[in-house]
Image (tube, grey):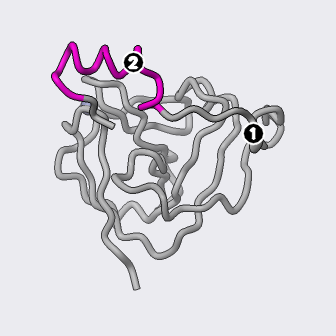
Amino acid sequence: MAEQMTGGCACDRIRYAAAINDNDAYLCHCRMCQRATGSVSIAFKNVKQVDVEWSHEPDWYDSSAIAERPYCRECGTSLGFRFKEGSDNMDLTVASFDDPSRFTPKHHFGAESMHRAWLNTEGLPEKRTEDYQALVDKWVDATGKFPG
Ligand SMILES: [Zn+2]
């Protein structure tokens, strides 16, 4: 039974609702995705295009001869990926969902470009944002409160 899940860009100009059938997601490590997102890999949830309803249409750009990517031209958020033709599916970026916590990675794609040093970071020192006082002070000075 599908659940409607919502998401959008960082400035909230672009919003979507998507019918989600399971928790399965994946990491793409291909160089195209690395360069498009500026990240070592990108977490995607594959969905049917007809299951995605945009309450405000995203901007799209041609990321290659065969694919295009939705994004927000105001804040720059990467929202997904789709082939220009030949597929009823598309990807939504996991972190653009309002609650990405239910998704779990089930496979890697673009493994030829995988940066293995970033795969298992368990055990590295961890620091919470609210424990970085200089950053909290910046937020309080600028807005009166810390958004965390
Ligand atoms: Zn935006």
The reply, left or right, for residue 140 in relation to residue 106 is left
Secondary structure of the residue carrying tag 1 is: loop
Count of numbered tags? 2
At label 2, the amino acid type is Leu
Q: Earlier in the sequence, mark 1 or mark 2?
A: 1
> Residue 121 appears at what percent x and percent y?
75, 39
Query: Gap in Å between the C-alphas at discs 1 and 2?
Result: 24 Å
> Residue 47 appears at what percent x and percent y?
46, 63
The quadrant of the rendering that contains the N terminus is: bottom left
| Magenta segment | 129-145
Residue 132 included in the magenta stretch of the image: yes
For residue 100, what is the image quadrant? bottom left
Outermost residue, bottom side: 1
Front-lying residue, 28 or 129: 129
- Tell which quarter ligand 1 is in: top left
Mark 2, Cα crowd under 10 Å, few <14 / some 14-19 / many 20+, is few
Residue at which label 1 appears: 121
Classify 90 as above or below 31.
Answer: below
**Please, what is the dominant secondary structure of the magenta stretch?**
helix
Using the image, tell me which numbered label, if any, was put on residue 135: 2
